[in-house]
Amino acid sequence: MSYQHIEASEVSNRYQEEKDRYVWVDVRTIEEYEEGHIPDSLHIPLDQLEQRQEELAGFKDQNILLVCRSGVRSVYAAEVLADHGYTHLYNLKGGMLEWAGPVE
C-alpha cells in the first residue's frame, strides 16, 4: 500500500497539534470545497490531480494528507500521487463526513 489511513475523527480532535505535520490537499469538487474545507488546505480536484500534481512537487518530502467527502476519492488521489513518486501519503479515512475539526 502506498499510503496510510488516518481516522478523521482522531486527527480532527488533535487538529491544533497535527495541522503542521501535513500538507492538507482537498480533492473534492469546487462546489464541495467552497461549502467548507479544512483551514489552509490546498484544493486540487481529483479529476485535475493527474495534470496538476506538479503543484505539489515542492512538498514531495513532506507528509501529504488527502481529504475528500468520505475517504474514497482521496484513496484514488493517493494512488495517483504514488505513481508520480510521492511516498509520504495519508488518507483522511471518513473524510469530511467524520471531520469534527475547524472548517472555513
Image (tube, helix red, strand yellow):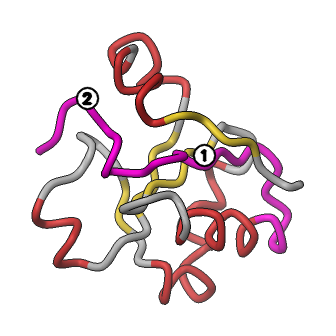
Q: Quadrant of residue 52?
A: bottom right
Q: Point out the stretch of residues depicted in magenta.
A: 82-104
> The residue tagged with tag 1: helix, strand or loop?
strand
Q: Is residue 3 above or below residue 103?
A: below
Q: Which residue is mark 2?
A: 101
Residue displayed at 22% across by 52% down: 37
49 left or right of 17 in image: right
Q: Nearer the viewer, mark 1 or mark 2?
A: 2
Expressed as whole percent of the image width and height from the top left, the position of residue 4 reads: 74, 42
> The residue tagged with tag 2: helix, strand or loop?
loop
Q: Callout 2, which amino acid? A: Gly
Residue displayed at 46% across by 48% down: 94
Using the image as rendered, state which of residue 45 and residue 91 is in the foreground.
91
The C terminus sits in image quarter = top left
The N terminus sits in image quarter = bottom right
32 left or right of 86 in image: left
Using the image as rendered, state which of residue 84 and residue 11 is in the foreground.
11
Residue displayed at 51% across by 58% down: 71
Q: Which residue is mark 1?
A: 64
Q: Is residue 69 above or below residue 4?
A: below
**Marker disc for residue 89:** none
Using the image as rendered, state which of residue 67 and residue 42 is in the foreground.
67
